[in-house]
Image (tube, coloured by chain):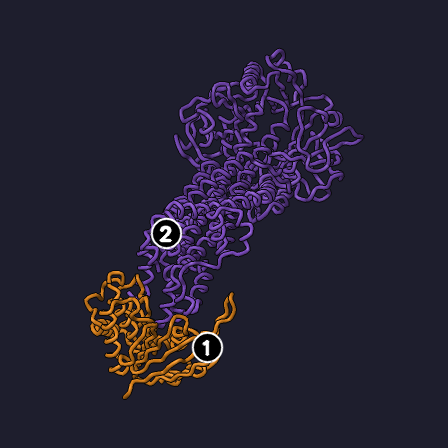
Amino acid sequence: MIQLSGITKIFSGSSGNFTALDNITLQFDKGSFVAVVGKSGSGKSTLLNMLTGIDRPDKGTVVINGIQVHKLGESRLATWRGANIGIVFQFFQLIPTLTIRENLLLAMDFVAAISKQERLNRANALLELVGIAMHADKFPSALSGGEQQRAAIARALANDPPILVADEPTGNLDSRNASAIHALFRQLVEAGKTVIVVTHEEVSSAGYDRVVTLRDGRLAGDERKAA
Amino acid sequence: MSPAFKKALNDLRVNPGRTLLAVCALTIGLWGVGAILVSYFILKNDLNENYLRTTPHHVALTSGDFARLDLAAFRQRPEIESAEFRDFSFLRIEVSPDQWLPLWLFGVSDFGKFDLARIYHEEGPATPPRGAVLLERNGQLVSSLRTGSLARVRAGGKLLQVPVAGIVFDPAQAPSTQDAFLYAYTDKATYSAISGEPVDRRLILRLKHAANKQEIEAATNAIVADLRNQGIVVGSINIPKPNQHPHQFQLNTLLAFQGSIGLLAFLMGAVLVSQLIGAILAQQVRQIGVLKAIGATRGKVLGIYLLMVLMLGAMASVIAIPLAVVSGYGFAGFVAKILNFDILTRTLPLSLYAGLIGCGLLLPVLFALPALLRGSRIPVRQALSDYGLGADPVHSLSIAGNMLSFSIRLALRNVLRRRNRLAATVATIALGVAIFNAGFNVRQSLLDFLEESKRAMRYDVQLVLKNSIPHEQALAPFSGIDNVQHIETWNGGRGRLQSSVVSTGNGIGIVALPRDTALVRMDVVQGRWLRDSGELEIVMNQMAADDFGEPVELGKQYRIDLNGRPAQVRLVGIVKEFDAAKIYIDKAQYDEYANPERRINSLMFVANDRSYERVVKLKRDIERRVAETDLDVFYVMSQAERAKIIYDHLDIILTLFMLLSSLVLMIGALGMAVATSTNILERTREIGVMRAIGATPKIVYRLFEAEGAMVSMTGISLGLLLSLPLSFYAAKFFGTLILGHNVSLNFAFSHAGFAATLAITLVFGWLASRIPARKAVSISNREALSYE
């Protein structure tokens, strides 16, 4: 269960203050597939940062599975995040100097939630799951965009986190690859994961369990798929 | 291999240029510091160890009464460790046709057994055959004499042919190359035959448990008193500086200089490493964000980059440590050759290697730590949104900037984007330039001092007799000699200066000269020169003031021994002179008080034609006249030779100045290259954007070149300014080290040095920005725009 209550985030800059999120309250259930949509500057990436603990709110609370995320210190937050939230970035952000398999192993190494003996098998299994096992020993630069995004998803799943957060995961992919990634997320939701996808694209509520729309830092819509 | 280790390793592998730059920077820094450490370790130990292994004597006593001494019984005295007769005479030896140098001839009791003042056999027989001598090895460098040569020796007016049977090494003597003396060793009978002197007149001894000069003096006084009770009157007492090689001062200067440059190189290396690691981290900011996003704590991020720095340090150590050891030994060997001693340190202690490895591995980590801590502290959000574009541009330049061309304005703004780095880079360059230029200036101070020394003594050739003789007798052989304007005659000898509590130990040289002589214009650093007054006045050089053992006071009366007569004298001045301890006194007063027969022992020749060739010819003519007489000459020396002796003493220091200053400059240039490379690495994407909107490679190249020029010009200008106070204090510091008694070298500005510094640093600065700028141009648009 993810509970965001009264989240406000204000950025200060040379041109004055900018309210990125204004008193947002949201709750995401376990095992749901959620899309957070909005135009550029709507606050969706800031919301993602709140969810993942990458940034802290100026006001409000972030509670995930009973943990008050906004109160965790830097080091605890990093370990907690590694174990509980898998992040998928728009530009994949794989470590270019490690092979695909090593990218997964590095994530497991950081969190140490998976025993050392299991790590290699788990990495191979995850790569199998996302369909790029044959590229395990290649460096990211040798893979196509779609393959790199699959690798990034596999890395996000490395420590078996219950929540997966993806920032514009298909923004850099062609439609065929985008569909494949979407299907992969759905597969993960069916396996019990909570998947939250942030996107600026128009999405059909049919593809998600819930579509949350942000506009100018405020909640502009919250559409749930009929059961 | 853990993924974290692999990441650190691969990060180095995929950026070979950057890794090479980092390894080069670390290698040069470590090499420099390491070589200084290694040579410091060797030199600090070996010169004195060479000296101490000879078991040097503490005291030398001379007496004509030693025939009464029971040497075996004397050796049994509780305070005596060892004692033996080691006579020596000042003779002259021909080192090349018509070139004569002083020769110290030693009469050795037993070549097979040295308990004291040991010499080492090197070539030929260990014991010279009757009638032959063994030559000290350093003499070969200032003469054509070798084993088997027949040396021409002048002794008391006699000219002898003496075979050189072999070569020995005597580490206890000042090097022939520096002091222009030769040393020869022979048995007692041959000594007597060559020198014409009786044997067993000079007793050298080493005391047990004598730790310092005071203890040696106290024990010596007791021994001399006991000998007097036995009817043995000691004529002279000589106590060399205990356990210290005669040229230790040179080494002390070198070591002090090495130490200070080593420290500076170390600090500059620190700046360099810190910048470099900062640059690597700047490139990896987004990756740090990703690492944190997938669960890496700050400690883990820090660990990865520490590992990377350790790897860089390890690579640099593998290259730099062997280089440091080889060049450290090489430099120590160079100094050893000049100062005539052997390198005894064959293996360096493990602790030194451990120190070097520690320096190689840990110092980069230590220096990089602030950058690493800063880098690992970047919040995830900030790290993930990093585009490598650097800091805010500088708005304040807009007004002044409008008057400049667009590229210059852009370059200026770029330079000011990373102000901390700019400050560190400029400081590194400035320090390098300042030290390099100060090296030239201090060198100029030393050369000026050399020139001053030449100007101070305005005679052309000096002839010093072993004994004082009547004025007419001394001058007679030189009447009508070609190219002589006039000859001035001086006198002197050895004396002791005494206050109520202390006295100079070894007999200070007394020089009695006309107070208004035109031949001496020394730099009076305190008080005044001699003048007509109703009382006995003296002026001493700074070495005499040092030798005294307690602070001397101008205007104070001291007791002095003049030609065997005690006298009360007033100290009126201290002069700066690169020479042994000397006291100057007015010859008229001296003659009146202690030399009624007006004898003289020095002839100062002033030439009509003072060109080098004519003075050399004059010296030869003087030597020829000497050869026709029975004058017992101590030495004949031209001013040029005297200047060369002083120069040779300073040359090693000057050479080191330049070597080490160059090292510092190199580190400065490297700092500049690192800073420019860092700028380029950080702005790779920006380069891509610029090129995408129409900047040609030439424009990009010029931009970086202009930035480099701005930084290096600022550093060079500051460095040149900084070099002025630095030169002033360095001249003061090294002057005191070389000359003693708080006598500093005068500040000098080397125009040639300034031009050389400017030229070299401009070329270095240009290269340091040109090479990375070319790299910037070589990056393709695609690479630049996709750069993470």
* Mark 1 vs mark 2: in front: 2
Camera-side residue of B43 and B688: B688
User: With B781 as the anchor, is B155 left or right in this view?
Assistant: right
Dot 2 falls on a residue whose secondary structure is helix
| Chain of the residue on which disc 2 is drawn | B
Dot 1 falls on a residue whose secondary structure is loop
Task: Identify the residue position indicated by label 2 in the image.
Answer: B691
Q: Which chain is orange?
A: A
Q: Amino acid at mark 2?
A: Arg
Kindly give the residue lying farthest to the left in the view shown: A134
Q: Position of residue B513 (x, y in %)?
A: 69, 26
The crowd level at tag 1 (other Cα within 10 Å; few <14, some 14-19, many 20+) is many
Which residue lies at the image location 70% right of the left edge and 34% below the top edge?
Answer: B539
Q: Is residue B408 visible?
A: yes
Q: Which mark is residue A57?
A: 1
Alpha-carbon distance for marks 1 and 2?
39 Å
Q: Which chain is purple?
A: B
User: With B576 as the anchor, is B767 left or right in this view?
Assistant: left
